[in-house]
Image (cartoon, helix red, strand yellow):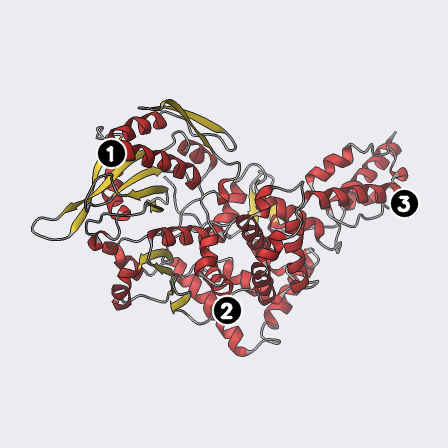
Amino acid sequence: MWGPQDRKYNNPPTQLSLKPSSQSLRSGNWSERKSHRLPRLPKRHSHDDMLLLAQLSLPSSPSSLNEDSLSTTSELLSSRRARRIPKLVQRINSIYNAKRGKKRLKKLSMSSIETASLRDENSESESDSDDRFKAHTQRLVHIQSMLKRAPSYRTLELELLEWQERELFEYFVVVSLKKKPSRNTYLPEVSYQFPKLDRPTKQMREAEERLKAIPQFCFPDAKDWLPVSEYSSETFSFMLTGEDGSRRFGYCRRLLPSGKGPRLPEVYCVISRLGCFGLFSKVLDEVERRRGISAALVYPFMRSLMESPFPAPGKTIKVKTFLPGAGNEVLELRRPMDSRLEHVDFECLFTCLSVRQLIRIFASLLLERRVIFVADKLSTLSSCSHAVVALLYPFSWQHTFIPVLPASMIDIVCCPTPFLVGLLSSSLPKLKELPVEEALMVNLGSDRFIRQMDDEDTLLPRKLQAALEQALERKNELISQDSDSDSDDECNTLNGLVSEVFIRFFVETIGHYSLFLTQSEKGERAFQREAFRKSVASKSIRRFLEVFMESQMFAGFIQDRELRKCRAKGLFEQRVEQYLEELPDTEQSGMNKFLRGLGNKMKFLHKKN
């Protein structure tokens, strides 16, 4: 469905001129231009601020745009910005500001970027040790060579996403353990499936192939099972990645059927293209409740559910059901406005990992290395895997992602391309025997690395890593402080805080990307890679970007922005907009350009009349 994307951006950097046009400066003599020179506003301004300015009745003559009126306008805009940023986010930002210092962006003229390029490349190792420079070069070569072997996919486009949301789920299956003939072990098999695949189409054949793999993911530990009398139900999830890059989520509830004596558990699994763990967890709660009465009550409920449309963001659907003894019931399923953290539980990460270990894992994933989680429980593997991937927002993990890898598929860890997989502890002896290439192996039960590459502490820019560590160590203190009543409630939770801490890391490193998206006369957007990197004042961030920009995560992020017909939306874009407003006024801001252009145009029209 999608062709391979070209990770390299071969467009030559276009001239980025930030000076006023010579045409506008020709009108009038020098004394006139000097008398009508407009004072500069101290900050950048967003699109929303421009709308606010339009409501403040700008004067009709450029000469009447005096210092007082502009100062009043600037104060109004500044106070509005302060109200717009939640206090928790302001506290996080202050930690980064204290650690980072004053270095941000250089002046964004093409000539300064070109000369800075020469200085940057020729002085790369002057203030650093030879070992550090050598390690940086090796990382760059390593990620370039590894990603040449990895398949890449085009970013999902809006039409495809809308097509995926036509139905709530694709199919529902029940997986049971069946005893092998003449053996004391069990094999997982699909004992029920809805809907039935009765049409011999290409799509149905592909669905049958997926169904064959599902039992292994529902019971990755099938060989370890024996009948039991008691078992607490467990919820977990997995992800199936197609050859074309398409992904399907499996939401599972493993439970012990009602009865007496030792018996084997069953797994009730919903397969959907949509990542909404909370919504499907509520569906599985209802499935478990009905299964406790009778298995026959589960299937009519799932049929009525499949006939329901998937709710739009922030909307709720009502599913009418009937339960003997209770009569008619209505189940309400709400889709959150922002489902980014809807299937994520960051608490599990801090239960299993120290802050330092978590940051090392985050750094390894950013550079698209191989990471293996090992734990005793399916739920631990599932929760921690989804949580670390959520830390990468606004980027998406582009490679193999299997939160719970069946023991029968353990050879996947020998793959030479990037992956993030989870293994049950029972598979650890086999894992240690395999010829695994360089990988980070993490024991989630003991908070230690089984195997590492020994450079995990040096992958991120040093000052930003210190800010990350401090903000996460102070997470409880930051949450407990007084919150802003106008801010979103989500910010004042552990999930909200952790997400904001990592978002700020990306804002500090790539928050200026939109300044380097240029548009051709045909309306095509192109990203100026080198100009983007060279504009950063910090050498350590430039070095980090040199490696990170080679990743498929970064390539997919930029490609998505290049292909979009409208501006991207979301929490990250909001924080980027606020960040750009904070930047020092080392060059003309967007508002200054707007006001100068307005004054020159009005002066030209006045002279013409």
Disc 3 is placed on an element classified as loop
Tell me where residue 47 appears, x and y as whole percent: 69, 39
> In which quarter of the view is residue 190 placed?
top left
Q: Residues within 10 Å of mark 3 (few under 14, many from 20)?
A: few
Tell me if residue 505 comes above or below residue 561 in the rendering: below
Q: Earlier in the sequence, mark 1 or mark 3?
A: 3
Q: Earlier in the sequence, mark 1 or mark 2?
A: 1
| Mark nearer the viewer, 1 or 2 | 1
Q: Is 423 on the left or on the right of 368, as rendered? A: left
Label 1 sits on residue: 193
Q: Amino acid at mark 3?
A: Asn
Tell me where residue 426 appears, x and y as whole percent: 27, 60
Kindly identify the residue that appears in the image at 27 percent across and 58 percent down. Answer: 410
Kindly identify the residue that appears in the image at 74 percent across and 53 percent down. Answer: 587
Front-lying residue, 188 or 503: 188
> In which quarter of the view is residue 327 placed?
top left
Label 2 sits on residue: 457
Count the numbered circles shown: 3
Q: Which mark is residue 29?
A: 3
| Mark nearer the viewer, 1 or 3 | 1
Q: Amino acid at mark 1?
A: Gln
Q: Amino acid at mark 2?
A: Asp
Kindly identify the residue that appears in the image at 37 percent across and 54 percent down. Answer: 381
